[in-house]
Image: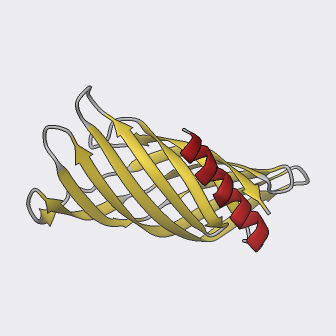
């Protein structure tokens, strides 16, 4: 536990000292519009307001789980409603994913995702609440090589920005 706190503190300190634009930390709940994933959670690390990295955990039955990594570039954030307290955006991006299925049946897949959703920026763009769906298309690498079934992860989360 001490190592995790140290690493997180070092990461935040490095971002603040280096002047990284829009470094953010957050968490999200993961759901699926299909039957591929069980509900899960993610730790979010955002080195800029246009790039998001998520480390995902999906908890299935008592013996199966899924660990995933997503990296998204979100170049489009159209402000739909601008206000003094909050700004509501439509977001669209492109990203990559890698998932490892752990348990009785080990498997690995990777591919392309297209996150689209909404976010609300609050408190002078310090706090963000968001939701998105990311249609995902990939290739299964293990146990055999082949095209994966498309899936549609849905996320609901929040992030704090250090600017």
Q: Residue at x 10, y 65 (%)?
A: 145
Image: 17 above or below 101:
below
State how the image is colored. secondary structure
Q: Position of residue 1 (x, y in %)?
A: 54, 38
Q: Residue furthest top?
A: 62
Q: Is residue 35 left or right of residue 6?
A: left
Q: How many marks?
A: 0
Image: 127 above or below 73:
above
Q: Quadrant of residue 139?
A: bottom left
Q: Quadrant of residue 61?
A: top left
Image: 94 above or below 103:
below
Near-viewer residue (51 or 84): 51
Residue 157 appears in view: no
Q: Is residue 124 left or right of residue 69?
A: right
Q: Position of residue 115 (x, y in %)?
A: 48, 60
Near-viewer residue (57 or 78): 57
Q: Residue at x 85, y 49 (%)?
A: 123
Q: Residue at x 33, y 60 (%)?
A: 98
Q: Residue furthest right?
A: 84
Q: Position of residue 150 (x, y in %)?
A: 26, 56
Q: Residue at x 77, y 64 (%)?
A: 16
Residue 97 appears in view: yes
Tell me the quarter of the image containing the C terminus. bottom right
């Amino acid at each position: 536990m001490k190592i995790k706190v140290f690493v997180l503190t070092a990461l935040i300190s490095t971002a603040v000292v280096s002047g990284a634009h829009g470094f953010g930390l957050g968490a999200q709940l993961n759901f699926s519009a299909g039957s591929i994933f069980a509900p899960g959670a993610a730790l979010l690390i955002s080195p800029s307001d246009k790039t998001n990295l998520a480390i995902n955990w999906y908890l299935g039955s008592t013996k199966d789980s899924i660990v995933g990594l997503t990296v998204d570039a979100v170049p489009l954030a159209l402000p739909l409603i601008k206000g003094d307290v909050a700004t509501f955006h439509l977001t669209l991006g492109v990203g990559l994913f890698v998932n490892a299925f752990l348990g009785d049946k080990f498997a690995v897949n990777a591919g392309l995702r297209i996150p689209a959703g909404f976010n609300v920026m609050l408190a002078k763009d310090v706090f963000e609440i968001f939701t998105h769906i990311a249609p995902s298309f990939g290739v299964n690498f293990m146990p055999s090589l082949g095209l994966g079934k498309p899936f549609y992860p849905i996320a609901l989360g929040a992030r704090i920005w250090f600017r």
